[in-house]
Image: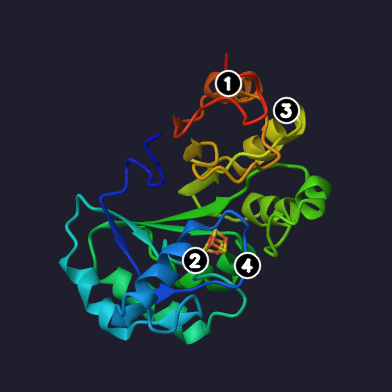
Amino acid sequence: MKQNRMFHIVTKTWNPITGCYHQCIYCWARKLTEKLRRRGVPKYKHGFKPTFHRNELRKAKYFSENDFIFVSDMGDMWGDWVDARWIIRVLEAIRESKATFLFLTKNPKRYHQFLNLIPDNCFLGATIETNRDMMYFRNRISKAPLPSVRYKAMKELEWEKKFLSIEPILDFDLDVFIKWITEINPKIIYIGYDNYNHKLPEPPLNKTQKLIKELTELGFTVYEKTLRKAWYENKH
Ligand code: SF4
C-alpha cells in the first residue's frame, strides 16, 4: 500500500526544531530520525531529543508565496519542553516570509502563549485522533495531552486559520466528535487511517465515511488521506 503521510496541500517541509517527547506508539518521525542518525546525518546526531537548528532559519525568506510549508514535521515544536526562545526565533523567521506555514501539535494550549507573536500567514493545527480519552489512555497511544485537552485548547483558540488532523483515526463517538470539530471550526480537516499496521483501536470504515459525510454536509473542507477498512474488518 502506498504510504500517504503528507498533506497534499503541503509543498515543502521545514524543520528548524526537531524531536519530541510525546512517545506516540505510531510515530513514524522517531523511526525515521533514528535511521538518519544511524546513517550519520549531522542534523539528527541528537536523535529524537528536542533540538533547535539555527541554520534552518535563513531558509524561510527563500520560500515563495505559493509555498505551503509544514513546520517541524520531524517532532512537535509546541511541546512544553521546547524553549520559548526557539519558538520566538522561528516565528520571527516566518514573519520575513510570504509563504503560508502550517504548525501541527498535540499540545495546542501552547499556541495561546504565543498568539500575539504568531504571524497571520500561519495555520495553527492540532492532531486529535478521537474523542475517547479513556480508550486513548488505556491503549497507551501517547503521552501527549489527552484528546479532550487538545479539543478545549483548539476550541478556545481565537485564530481564523485552524487546521485539524484526524490521523491516525481512532474509534470515536460520532455525535461527540462532530460537536468537538464544529466547535473548533477548522478551515481544513484531514482524515486518514494508520499507514503502518500498528493495529490501533480504529473505527470501521463505514463509520469514518459517515463522519466525513456529515462534516462535509456541515460545510467543512475535508480531505481524505489513507481510507481503508479497519485491520479487524473482513477484507473479503
Ligand atoms: S507528537 Fe508527533 S512527533 Fe511526537 S511522538 Fe507523536 S507522532 Fe511523533
Of badges 4 and 3, nearer the viewer stands: 4
Per the model, the C-alpha gap separating discs 2 and 4 is 10 Å
- Please tell me which of labels 3 and 1 falls first in the chain: 3
Dividing the picture into quadrants, the one containing residue 144 is: bottom right
- Secondary structure under tag 2 reads helix
Disc on res. 30: 2
On whether ligand 1 comes within 8 Å of the CB at mark 4, the answer is yes
Which of the marked residues, 2 or 1, is nearer the chain's N terminus?
Answer: 2
Q: Is the residue marked 2 within 8 Å of ligand 1, measured from its CB?
A: yes
In terms of sequence position, does the residue under pointer 2 or pointer 4 come before the other? 4
Question: CB of mark 4 within 8 Å of CB of mark 3?
Answer: no
Q: Which mark is residue 174?
A: 3
Amino acid at pointer 4: His
- Give the mark, 1 or 4, whose residue is nearer the N terminus: 4
User: Where is residue 227 drawn, in percent x and y?
Assistant: 50, 28
Q: Quadrant of the N terminus?
A: top left
> Where, by quadrant of the figure, is residue 60 drawn?
bottom left
Residue underneath mark 4: 22
The residue located at (45%, 72%) in the rendering is: 117
Residue 27 vs residue 201: left or right? left
Q: Which residue is mark 1?
A: 209
Image point (31%, 80%), residue name: 40
Q: Give ligand 1's quarter of the image.
A: bottom right
- How far apart, in angstroms, are the residues tagged by discs 2 and 1? 30 Å
- Point out the frontmost of discs 2 and 4: 2
Q: Who's the residue at 47% across and 86% down the image?
A: 85
* Whether label 3 touches label 1, CB < 8 Å: no
